[in-house]
Image: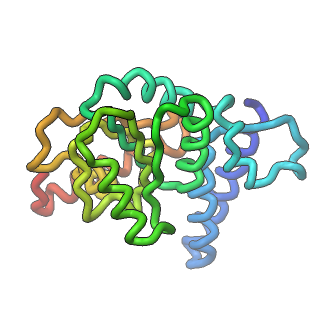
Amino acid sequence: YNEILYQYNKCMAQMRSATNLIRKRELYEMSMRYLTKLRVYCDLFYFKTKTEDELKEDDLDHEESFMASSKLQMLYEELLSKINDVPYKRIIVFSCFVSTLSVLEKIINELEPEIMTMQYVGSKTKKERDEIVAQFTKEDETRPMILFASLGAGSVGLNLTPCSTIFMMDTSMNPFDELQAINRVHRLTQKNKVNIYKFYMKNMIEENILLTHTQKIEQAKSNGLKM
């Protein structure tokens, strides 16, 4: 834990340094890269005992991170407690990062093989995505299913009823992307109560992003947006 906290704080310092350079109109992309890395750390929050030189970004994509990630552990426990009680045993997990979805899917496949999992991400063809949606929305309770969807690919143009349970794994920079994702389920044809569960790391970068969400939504409302 101490080592990952050290790496997180180091990355935070690098982002602040890059942010200062933005004021000089330099290195905007570098600042966003560090911000993205901080958000991935919030998802997986994983460390082995290694020297700094041995730490690699690839470690962030490894399923072993589950044992050290409080967010992944909580999601896993919540999925198991709810999967058999929700309509048609269907749950959607949204994340901004495909790497996070891949870790989650490996965990479920290894620990709960009776649960069918699918990934809805932009790298799949339109035909593959259409087949996934058709299978996931079939009103059939023979086998529980979890759809792991990237926020970019799964937040627009879909009708994901009869599912009515959503887990938001991380915090998007744009709150309206999250609202679009929720509206894939909270639609006029929805017959069930929709439950949304959002995960974020307290005292980390995600908490700051949530504050900007409130500001952006209030500003949009003041400009005439109806919600």
Left/right of residue 199 with respect to residue 62 in the rendered view? left
**Residue situated furthest bottom in the rendering:** 25
Measured as percent of width and height from the top left, residue 108 is found at 55, 35
Query: Who is closer to the viewer here, 17 or 47?
Result: 47
Q: Can residue 172 be seen in this view?
A: yes
User: Is residue 209 at all visible to an observer of this figure?
Assistant: no
Task: Specify whether 100 is left or right of 212.
Answer: right
Q: Residue furthest front?
A: 142
Q: How many marks?
A: 0
> Could you tell me residue 141's position as x and y percent?
29, 33
Q: Is residue 127 above or below residue 90?
A: below
When asked about the image quadrant of residue 47, the answer is top right
- 214, 151: nearer the viewer: 151
Name the residue: 69% across, 57% down: 14
Depth check: give the residue in front, 144 or 23. 144
Q: Where is residue 156 in the image (x, y as percent from the top left)?
A: 28, 63
From this view, report whether residue 27 is shown above or below residue 96: below
Residue 125, by quadrant, is bottom left
Q: Which quadrant of the figure contains the N terminus? A: top right
- Residue at x-position 13% and y-position 59%: 225
Instruction: Determine the residue positioned at 33% across, 37% down.
Output: 90
Please name the residue shown 21% across and 36% down the image: 194
Q: Which x, y percent locates residue 163? A: 26, 41
